[in-house]
Amino acid sequence: MSFLGSLLGLVSTARARIATDTRRRAWLLVLAAWSIGGTGIWVMHFMAMVGFSVQDSPLRFDVPITIASFFIAVITVGVGLFIVGLGKPKLWKVLVGGPITGVSVAFMHYTGMKAMHINGTFEYRTSLFIASYAIAIVAATVALWFTIVVRGMLATVAAAAVMGVAVCSMHYTGMYAMRVHLLHSTDNVPGVDVNWFLAPIVLFVLVVVIALASAVMAVPSEREQAEAAAVRDKIAAGRAMREEAGPVFGGGPIGGGAVGGGAVGGVGAAPAPGGQAAGRGFAARAANGIADARRQRGR
């Protein structure tokens, strides 16, 4: 999930980078934030939590806090992408947006853990807790750097793999830092079972992947835009050559030539000098041809 979300997010940011329209660039960056933050980070986190359990205690999740963690992931990744993606790419933007996004991503992880309830309490080892934040900051900074320098499909796939490994490393470092203290209590644990999230997550991933793939495919890539620009340049060059060569049969350009002393296609339009010369030459050749034909009939 982390690799897939990162891949779609990088493709979206690559399309946004070459977009000339500000509105198109903005919504592509929103799609990238949804993909990286929603699928690459949040979905990965809760897919991993499906495999987590605490012995001798039920495990439940608080739904509002869980939903809040999703929006934290998407919005904070979006902030970093907009800092880097709008305007000209600069190194200082990466160095500012990376730590902001990294801290927020780690905060999303621990917000998701805060939504988890057991018959006991959690605590975290300080050194590993800090290490998980450091991994998140480095991973986010590298991810934002990838968004402005990565070009080509192979490089994008490699960058997505690096991002996926980094996000998972942050998650499992935070999980390894956690310690559980169980309470001998018979009270019910509030919340819903983690499997309650499984079907919505699968449906969410399918919808996001289809929507993002459709949206990204609807926007031309850098190569396609370059090919289209080359075709437009050739058409413009051919048009310019035809205009310089002038009309073939006299009378000036269309809408401006004079035939039989009257303007055609435009009142008062003056014929081009080159068109007049070509017209006189053609008339002379036609007159000579008619005279030759008459002499042949007379013989």
Image: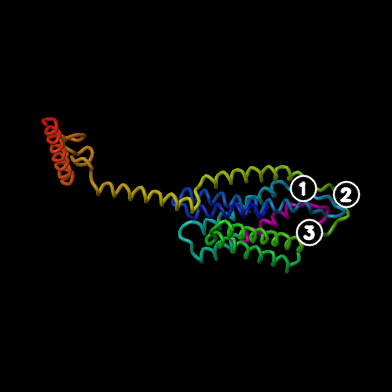
Q: Mark 2 points at which residue?
A: 186
- The outermost residue toward the top is 297
- Which quadrant of the figure has residue 95? bottom right
Identify residue type, mark 1: Val
What is the span of residues highlighted in magenta in the rendered image?
Answer: 102-121
Q: Confirm or deny contact between disc 2 and disc 1 (CB under 8 A).
A: no
Q: In this view, does 232 lie to the left or right of 160?
A: left
Task: For marks 3 and 2, give the one nearer the viewer.
Answer: 3
Q: Is label 2 or label 1 in front? A: 1
Residues under labels 3 and 1: Cα distance? 17 Å
Q: How far apart are marks 3 and 2 (CA)?
A: 18 Å
Measured as percent of width and height from the top left, residue 196 is found at 76, 43
Nearer the viewer's eye, disc 3 or disc 1? 1
Marking on residue 122: 3
56, 43: nearer the viewer: 43
Within 10 Å of disc 1 (Cα), the crowding (few <14, some 14-19, many 20+) is some
Are dots 3 and 1 in contact, CB under 8 Å? no
Which residue is at a point 59% across and 58% down the rendered structure image? 154
Counting from the top left corner in percent of width and height, residue 133 is at 67, 64
Q: Judging from the image, what secondary structure is the residue with disc 3 in?
A: strand
Q: Which of 126 and 47 is in front in this view?
A: 47
Q: Could you tell me the amino acid type at mark 2?
A: Thr
Q: In which quarter of the image is residue 179?
A: bottom right
Q: Is any part of residue 217 visible from this angle? A: yes
